[in-house]
Image (spheres, grey):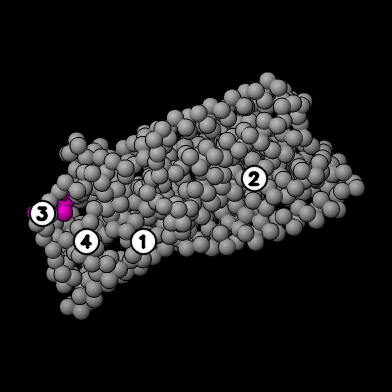
Amino acid sequence: MIDFLGGQHFIELIYLVASALFILALKWMNTPVTARRGILAGETGMVLAIGGTLLQLGVDGKLQHLAIDYTWVMIALAIGTGIGVPLGLVQMTAVPQRTALSHAFGAFCVTLVGTAEFYLRTPNVQPLMMSVLCCEVILGGLTVTGSLMAAGKLQEVLPQRPITFKGQNLVNLVLFLVAVGIAAYLVHDPSATRLYPVMVGIALVFGVMLVIPIGGADMPTVISLLNSYAGLSAAAMGFVLNNKLLIIAGALDGSSGFILSVIMSKAMNRSFTNVLFGAFGQVAPAAAGAEEARPVKSASADEAAGILAAASKVVIVPGYGMAVAQAQHKVRELYDALTKRGIDVRFAIHPVAGRMPGHMNVLLAEADVPYDRLMEMDDINGDFAQTDVSLIIGANDVTNPAAKTDKSSPIYGMPVLDVEKSHTVMVIKRSMNPGFAGIDNPLYYMNQTLMLFGDAKAFVSNIVKELSGTHS
Amino acid sequence: MGSSLIDGLFVFMLAGFIGFEVIKRISPLLHTPLMSITNALDAIAVVGAIVLVGKHESRLSFILGILAVIAATSNIVGGFLITDRMVRMFKSSRPAKSN
C-alpha cells in the first residue's frame, strides 16, 4: 500500500504536514487563549512524523533485522517515555533546571546521531557535508555539557557564584580554535578518524568552560542561548540527514532561543559577549561594602495592612525571592483580599524576574493569579506615578533607581521598574543585606519607602490576617 | 548531495524568518511554555535516530541510535507534558469570551 503511495514521497508528504503543524503550534502559542490548540497541533505533527517514520522503516528496513530493530525502537521509546514523564511533572520552581536538562538531552541525541553518521560515512564525505557534520557535533557537544552545568547551577548542586581564573577567556578561545582547526582538517582529510573523538572531547570541555564563569543572575540569558544552540545543532543534523522537517524544527527552535536571548540581554543591559565573558558578580561586592548603615523606615504587618487598605491602586513587584520563600500562594491571598475591597491590584513583571524567560508569570499563574493582571515592564512603568502603593516582594536589582542615575553602578543602564514614583513603596526583605548581585539599592533609604523586615511568606500571611481581621 | 544541501539552506533560511516573525509576536507571559514546546518540537530529531536504528549499518550506529531515541523521546514526552501543565494554569479574571 505504501508503495502505491510512492515510497519516499509518502514520508516526505507526512513531514510536510508535520512542518506546517509545527509552525501553527508556535503561532498559536502567542496568547493563553489559543496556546492549548498550539500544543495539540505540535503533538499531532509529532505523532504523524514518528508514525510515518516507523512505517517507512518497515518498508525500507533490512529484512533480517526488521523484527529486532522494531523491538529495540519500541523499547527505546518506552524508556524515553519513562524518563520524560517525571521530567514533565516537576514543580514550577524547578522548570528552569528541567529546561536546561532537556536542552542537554536534545543536544545529546544530535551529537550521537552525528557521531554515528561520521563513522558510517568516512572517508567518503564531501567537504561541505563534513563541515556541516562538524558544526552539528561541536554545537551539540558544547550544548550537552554547557546545559548540564547550567542545570547543576540552577539546581544548586554546583556553586551559583561565577567560577573564574586568570586567562580564562584565552583558554576558551584556544579550545575553540583547536576544535575548529580539527574540523577544518577533517574537511580536508575525512579519513583522519582518530581526530574525531578529540574534536568532540574539546567541544564537551568547551561547554563546561563556557558556563562555569556565568553567575546565577545571568541564567535567563544562558538558558536562552543554549536553547538556540540546541536548535541550530538539530538543524545541522537535518542538513546531514537531508531531512527538511528537522531543518525547519531546528530553525524555529534556533530563532526562538535567539530572540529570547536578545530580550534577556536587553533587559539586563548587557551584550552577548558581556554575558559570556563578563563574569557578573565578581566586581559587584566591592561596591556594596562602601555604604555605611543609613537610616531606613520600617513598618509592621498591621501598619502595612492599614496603608494597603487605604490605597485604591496597588502594584505588586515580585522577584525570584518570592518563589524561593514559596510565598506566591500567600501573595495571591493578598491579591484576593485587596481585590475584594475594590482595590485595583496589578503585578509588575520585569523580563528577568525569575530564572528563565517568563518564569515569574508561570509561578503566579500556578498560584491562580489571573494573567490579565500580570503587566510587562513597558506597559506598567508609566502607571507608577498614579500608584498608591508598590509592594516589592523578593525583588531587588530590578527596582534599583541607581540603574537610571548612578553611572558608577554595575547595573547602570539596565531597564528597571519605576517603583520610586509611586506614593508609597513597601519592600519585604529579610534584612538589609544586599541582593543576589551584591548591589546596594538607594530605593530603601528614600522618604516614601517602608521596609517590612521578615520572611516573605510569613509577612504577607500576617498582612492578609490583618486585612481580614480589622474589616469584614 | 551538494544540491540537496543547498535546498536545505533555502529551507533553513525561510524557516528562520518564519520563526522570527511568529515568535516575535508571542506574549512574554508565555515565554517559559514557548521554550518548553520548542524543546519538544526540536526533539523531532528522534526520526533521524529511528532511521539510524532501522538502517542497522553497524553495531556502533545501532547503539548510538537507540540512545538517541531514548534522549529525544524523553524530551518529546516531558516537553509536551510540562507545556500543557503550564498553559492550563493561565486563567483570565474576565469570564471567557468566545472569539
Residue A431 tag number:
4
Q: Nearer the viewer, mark 3 or mark 2?
A: 3
Q: Earlier in the sequence, mark 3 or mark 1?
A: 3
For label 4, the SS is: loop
Q: CA distance from mark 1 to mark 2?
A: 33 Å
CB under 8 Å between discs 3 and 2? no
Q: CA distance from mark 3 to mark 2?
A: 55 Å
Instruction: Please state which amino acid type lies under the numbered disc 3.
Output: Arg
Residue drawn at point x = 25 percent, y = 40 percent: A410
| Local crowd size for mark 1, using a 10 Å CA cut-off: few (<14), some (14–19), many (≥20) | many
In the depicted structure, whether residue A362 falls above or below residue A220 = below
Residue drawn at point x = 76 percent, y = 52 percent: A73
Disc 2 designates what residue? Answer: A109
Q: CA distance from mark 4 to mark 1?
A: 17 Å
CB under 8 Å between discs 4 and 3? no
Q: Is residue A144 visible?
A: yes
For label 2, the SS is: helix
Tell me where residue A471 appears, x and y as whole percent. Answer: 18, 77
Q: Earlier in the sequence, mark 1 or mark 2?
A: 2
Q: Main secondary structure of the magenta part?
A: helix
| Local crowd size for mark 3, using a 10 Å CA cut-off: few (<14), some (14–19), many (≥20) | few
Tell me where residue A1 appears, x and y as whole percent. Answer: 86, 46
Q: Earlier in the sequence, mark 3 or mark 2?
A: 2
Disc 1 designates what residue? Answer: A323
Q: Earlier in the sequence, mark 4 or mark 1?
A: 1
